Amino acid sequence: MTWDVAVIGAGPAGLSAAYAAARAGARTVVLEKAEHPRYKTCGGGLIGTSLAAAAARIDVPADDQVDRVTFTADGRRPFTRRHGPGHLLTMVRREEFDDRLRAAAVEAGAEIRQRVAVRGVEQSPEQVRVRLADGSELLAGVAIGADGSAGVTARQVGVEYCQVDLGLELEIPAPAEVAQRWRGRLLLDWGPLPGSYAWVFPKGDRLTVGVIAARGEGERTRRYLRNFVDRLGLGGLEPVHDSGHLTRCRSTDSPLRRGRILVAGDAAGLLEPWTREGISFALRSGTLAGTAAASGDLDGYVDSVHQQLVPSMRAGHQILTAFSRHPGVFHTMLATPPGWRMFASFCRGETTFDRTLDRRRVRAALALLS
C-alpha cells in the first residue's frame, strides 16, 4: 500500500499534521519510535496560542491554571504579578497532552504505528520511500518529518540552526503543603548566564523545575539548576524524572522542504528564540504541513510558515539579543504596568512579539538595548 502522507514522529507537530491530513481525506500513517503515553522533557506550559490550536481537537488535560507569576533576577529582587479575570497559562503533562492528540488523529482517520523506528528516507519525483529499522519499507506520496531536530528528516532536508540551547529539567513530586504553595503560580528567574532563565511550573502533585542556557556552558548550567532548586527549598525532594535536551532554532534561510519531504515543529527548528516556547509552533506548523500535504500544495506550506510563524521568530531573536545583554532592565520593565500587560498579552495569545515590536516606542527601546 502506498500512503498519501507518512508522518514521522508522534509529538504535537506530527499528530497535528496527521489530524489535518486525515481530516482532508488523505490516507495517513504516523510512525513513532516510542509508545504513548510517554514522558517528554518539556515545561508543559500552554500559552493562549497553543490552547486555540488544540482546543478544537481535544479537551486539554490541565493540571493547573496559572494566573500569577513571580519574577526574580538570579534569586534577587522578587515581585509577583497577578492577572485577572482569566488565566495566563495552562499547565499540562506531555504524556497526557500528546496521548489525547494521538487519539484525535486516530479518530480523524490516521493510522498510528508505535514502536516503529525510521532509519532513513529516500525520494523520487513520484514518491517517498521510508526505511524502517526492521528492514521493511513504506511508500508515501509525501513525508512530513516531525521527529525532532536530531531526527533523520531534518538531516535529509538539510535544516540549519543559528541557536542551540541546553535545557535541563526535573519533575519533582510535591507534598500537599508544597503543591498548595505553588498552585496557580509560576516562577521565572533570569539567570546568571547570558540569555538564560529558570522556571517552576505547578502541575498538581508535581513541580516541573528547569533551566535553559546556550549550549557550551554545560557545567555552569547544571550548577545554575542545583542552586536554583536549593534556593527554593526543593533540594530534599527526589525527582521522578531528571532529564535534559537540546533545543535548536532554525537559521533564517534554513529549508522547510526538500522535494516531497516537509519538516515541521522541532525538526524544522521552529520555536520562539527568547522563551524557547515550541508547542504552539509545533501545533501550528504541523497543521500547516498536513493541510499542504493532503492538497499537494507543498510550496504553500513554505509560504504559510514564512507568513504566519517566521515574523514572530525574527522578533524573538531581537528580544533575546537585548535580554542577553541587559536582563536587569527586562526585570525592571516587567514590574511596570505596561511591561506586565505586554507579557500577559503574549501568554494569553492576544499578541505576538512581532506585533509588539511594531510599536515605535518598543522598537526604539529594544534597538537601544541591543
Image: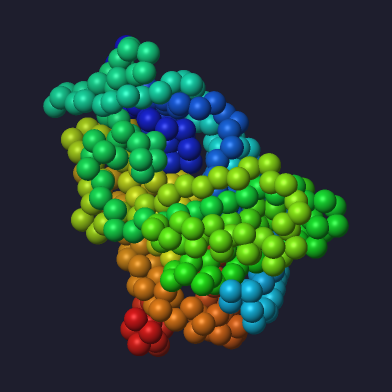
Please state the horizontal and vertical placement of residue 144, each as a whole percent of the image. 33, 34
Please state the horizontal and vertical placement of residue 207, each as a whole percent of the image. 70, 53
In the rendered picture of this protein, how many numbered marks are placed on residues?
0
Q: Residue at x 44, y 81 (%)?
A: 326
Please state the horizontal and vertical placement of residue 170, each as a whole percent of the image. 62, 50
Q: Is 64 rendered above or below residue 242?
A: below
Q: Is 104 rendered above or below residue 117?
A: below
Residue 216, by quadrant, is bottom left
Relative placement, left or right, of 123 versus 312 is left
Q: Is 233 rendered above or below residue 45?
A: below
Relative placement, left or right, of 270 versus 49 is left
Which residue ends up furthest to the right in the rendered image? 177
Q: Residue at x 21, y 25 (%)?
A: 122
Please state the horizontal and vertical placement of residue 10, each as a whole percent of the image. 46, 33
Q: Residue at x 25, y 50 (%)?
A: 160
Query: Can residue 65 be seen in this snapshot?
Result: no
| Residue 336 or residue 23, whichever sits in front | 336
Query: Can residue 332 be seen in this snapshot?
Result: yes
| Residue 328 or residue 21, whichever sits in front | 328
The C terminus sits in image quarter: bottom left
Q: Residue at x 63, y 38 (%)?
A: 96
| Residue 13 or residue 74, whichever sits in front | 74
The N terminus sits in image quarter: top left
